[in-house]
């Protein structure tokens, strides 16, 4: 049972000049299921944090009011459950059942009621394992399912989901959507933040769109909102269903071989794979979780030595993992799934200058490369910014730009479109297509079918590595 | 790098089943007298007692040896240091290694220290080898009223430690991908190590912050008194374990006093 009322609500984090969210008037009735949309930076996550009572009064400046059943969210806390993006940093305990029980213990639920409620919550989300199952042995989707059970066990009147599938592969995302669909009931109000509208649509009956400058841009039934605002939402980066994506077929036939894998394998992570990456060709590496796609990308990128088999580069005596790092960057550029892992300086411009400097390019050449890349990837305005403060899309563009700074002929990317909004996605695919047409080789590990359709000239599918034994069932 | 965190013992063994806090208390009580003396007899007796209790903890000697191998490094270090630098070179002369005279006094001193290292550390190793971290946190909160904020918080942080290994490998490879390596230059190696460690620390803090927020969102910051899903009981058998450990520790010390070898660390 929860009703949410916001009147001209705004929040500014301490020490920030601009408001994270502002001028929001909203009335969500009991039992409604709302999809909250808006471009990056419109304040969706801040709004959820406010509703969950996670914005302490001394951590910023508030405007207007926000009430849950007439109470300040900081006091209504017990009636609100929030599911975050990253399952790794939500699980507290080593055993699955203990983790669900954690919230119940905190709320002082009598010991006798705890285990029946744990069992009930696990059933609601369709958790298939015994309660003693180690949380570290679960896949990302299963962990997120468990975290959802932990939220539901508290029987919150208001359930908040903050991009619950953003850190999951498609199979994991399906697990969560199925669990939310199973678990929803008429007794709780639901607010979901999710970029991928098509996937959230079956779960919701109302759409609220936050405007980038503050306030609510649109509010109503999904069909009505998308009929009226579809194009502008798509333009802002929201994944509105029914808007086609551009396709980028190769203009010319592929050129020479850039790197080859000969039965390259890595113990427990990748069974023997043989493949070739060629100039002027975009190659997608696909396959289920655990097939070793990322491991293969690290090997092709000269960052990991295969345990058996070999990797070679035509014209080079040694395999790439034996090269000096600076030389490696001039031949093969790697872009990691987590962009922040690759940032080593405190300024965007320095990040771009680092590679060319280590190759001992002249200061004039370095400056020219930096300016060119800043302009090309629309980062000029951010040249002085700290890379860690960038948004997801900006960080992704910067990580691609750093790999390009040393002008390698081959670019190896791990899940480049993961978690990106529609606008960044389109830009990124267009950039990779342009690089391919300039004669670069592109290898991308991906789960994203749209990316494969839009860009890939060839697909290398990795089969699953031999699976461990059958998994135990929670109930016979 | 693997972390020796999981219990490795037979959980049904009579002493392994005891309350974690009782085991921890017993280990402390038993080791304490050993710190009071420098003679080799007390730790030798203690070590013998510890090895005798192993079967009751369900710990096999091989498993213990694998857990305790870093101790052998410490022991070797002590042995070398003592032989080279011990000030006390009394007793009869045994042999000379280069400029160093090895005497019975040196050997006794070194042996005493090595035995102490093993005797003091083994009880702790046995406790952690037979105790599930969750049970320990539960017992700390329920039986000795440790603040849950501390005990459960530490437990949650503990769960993130294995992720650090993976993160370290990722950061190292990411640096190589950026053109940063140290080659054979030891100074560059040190700098690279320091900068990677800093990045790891920053990442760990961010992750810890997110975990803390998620825990508070599930009511960890609530003022309602917590209830316990898993009960830990402190029984008479647990009390007996603590008392027994205290008595045995004192007995080892008394024996060395009666034998006339007691050598107090103070005075």
Image (cartoon, grey):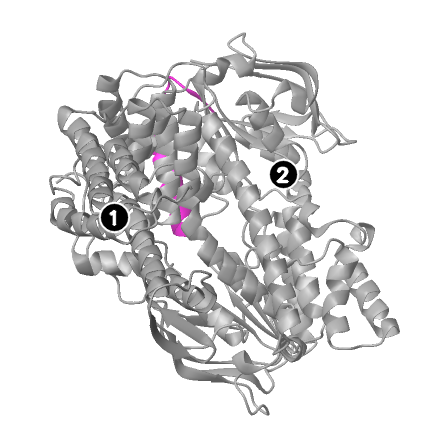
Tell which tag, 1 or 2, sits nearer the viewer. Answer: 1
Q: Position of residue B128 (x, y in %)?
A: 28, 45
Disc 1 from disc 2: Cα separation: 81 Å
Is B218 placed above or below B223 here? below
User: Which residue matches tag 2?
Assistant: A230
Chain part drawn in magenta: A170-190
Residue B258's disc number = none
Q: Quadrant of residue A9?
A: top right
Q: Position of residue B11 (x, y in %)?
A: 16, 43
* Circle on res. B42: 1
Residue B228 occupies quadrant: top left
Q: Could you tell me which chain the residue with mark 2 belongs to? A: A
The residue under the point 28% across, 54% down is: B40
> Could you say where residue A365 lies in the image, as x and y percent from the top left?
84, 74
Q: Characterize the magenta stretch by its predominant secondary structure.
A: helix
Q: Are marks 1 and 2 in contact (CB under 8 Å)?
A: no
- What subunit carries mark 1? B
């Amino acid at each position: 049972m929860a009703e949410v009322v916001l009147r001209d609500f705004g929040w500014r984090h301490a020490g920030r000049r601009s408001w994270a969210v502002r001028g929001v008037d909203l009335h969500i009735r009991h039992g409604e299921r709302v999809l909250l949309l808006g471009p990056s930076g419109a304040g969706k996550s801040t709004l959820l944090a406010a509703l969950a009572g996670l914005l302490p009064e001394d951590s910023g400046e508030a405007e207007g009011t926000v009430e849950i059943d007439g109470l300040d969210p900081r006091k209504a806390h017990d009636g609100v459950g929030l599911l975050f993006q990253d399952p790794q940093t939500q699980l507290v305990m080593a055993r699955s059942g203990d983790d669900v029980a954690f919230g119940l213990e905190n709320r002082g639920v009598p010991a006798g009621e705890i285990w029946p409620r744990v069992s009930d919550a696990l059933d609601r989300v369709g958790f298939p394992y015994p309660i003693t199952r180690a949380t570290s042995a679960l896949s990302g989707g299963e962990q997120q399912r468990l975290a959802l059970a932990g939220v539901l066990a508290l029987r919150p009147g208001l359930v908040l989901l903050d991009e619950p599938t953003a850190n999951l592969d498609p199979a994991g995302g399906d697990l969560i959507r199925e669990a939310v669909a199973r678990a929803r009931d008429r007794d709780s109000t639901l607010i979901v933040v999710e970029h991928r509208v098509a996937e959230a649509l079956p779960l919701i009956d109302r759409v609220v769109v936050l405007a980038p400058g503050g306030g609510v841009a649109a509010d109503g039934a999904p069909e009505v909102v998308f009929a009226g605002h579809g194009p502008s939402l798509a333009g802002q980066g929201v994944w509105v269903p029914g808007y086609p994506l551009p396709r980028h077929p190769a203009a010319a036939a592929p050129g020479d071989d850039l790197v080859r894998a000969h039965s390259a394998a890595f113990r427990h992570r990748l069974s023997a794979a043989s493949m070739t990456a060629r100039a002027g060709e975009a190659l997608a590496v696909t396959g289920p979780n655990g097939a070793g796609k990322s491991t293969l990308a690290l090997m092709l990128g000269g960052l990991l030595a295969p345990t058996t088999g070999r990797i070679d580069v035509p014209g080079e005596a040694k395999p790439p993992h034996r090269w000096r790092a600076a030389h490696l960057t001039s031949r093969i550029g790697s872009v990691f799934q987590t962009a922040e892992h690759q940032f080593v300086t405190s300024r965007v411009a320095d990040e771009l200058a680092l590679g060319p400097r280590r190759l001992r390019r002249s200061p004039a050449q370095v400056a020219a490369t930096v300016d060119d890349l800043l302009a090309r990837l629309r980062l000029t305005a951010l040249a002085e910014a700290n890379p860690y403060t960038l948004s997801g899309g900006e960080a992704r563009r910067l990580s691609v730009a750093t790999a390009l700074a040393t002008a390698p002929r081959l670019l190896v990317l791990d899940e480049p479109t993961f978690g990106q909004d529609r606008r960044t996605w389109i830009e990124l695919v267009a950039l990779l297509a342009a690089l391919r047409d300039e004669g670069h080789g592109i290898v991308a590990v991906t789960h994203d079918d749209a990316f494969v359709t839009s860009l890939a000239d060839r697909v290398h599918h990795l089969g699953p590595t031999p699976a461990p034994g059958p998994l135990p069932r929670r109930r016979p | 790098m693997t972390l020796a965190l999981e219990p490795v013992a037979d959980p049904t063994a009579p002493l392994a089943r005891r309350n974690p806090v009782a085991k921890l208390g017993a280990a402390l009580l038993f080791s304490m007298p050993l710190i009071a003396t420098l003679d080799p007899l007390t730790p030798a007796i203690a070590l013998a007692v510890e090895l005798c209790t192993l079967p009751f903890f369900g710990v096999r000697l091989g498993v213990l040896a694998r857990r305790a191998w870093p101790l052998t490094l410490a022991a070797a270090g002590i042995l070398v240091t003592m032989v080279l630098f011990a000030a006390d070179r009394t007793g009869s002369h045994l042999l000379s290694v280069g400029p160093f005279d090895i005497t019975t006094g040196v050997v006794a001193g070194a042996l005493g220290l090595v035995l102490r290292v093993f005797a003091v550390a083994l009880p702790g190793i046995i406790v952690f080898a037979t105790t599930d971290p969750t049970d320990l946190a539960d017992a700390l909160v329920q039986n000795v009223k440790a603040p849950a904020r501390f005990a459960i918080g530490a437990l949650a942080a503990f769960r993130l430690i294995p992720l650090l290994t993976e993160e370290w490998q990722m950061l190292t490879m990411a640096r190589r991908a950026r053109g940063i390596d140290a080659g054979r230059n030891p100074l560059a190696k040190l700098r690279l190590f320091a900068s990677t460690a800093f990045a790891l620390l920053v990442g760990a803090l961010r992750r810890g912050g997110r975990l803390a927020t998620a825990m508070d969102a599930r009511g960890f910051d609530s003022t309602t008194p917590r209830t316990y899903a898993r009960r830990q009981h402190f029984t008479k058998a647990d009390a007996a374990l603590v008392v027994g450990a205290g008595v045995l520790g004192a007995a080892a010390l008394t024996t060395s006093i009666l034998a006339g070898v007691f050598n107090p660390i103070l005075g």
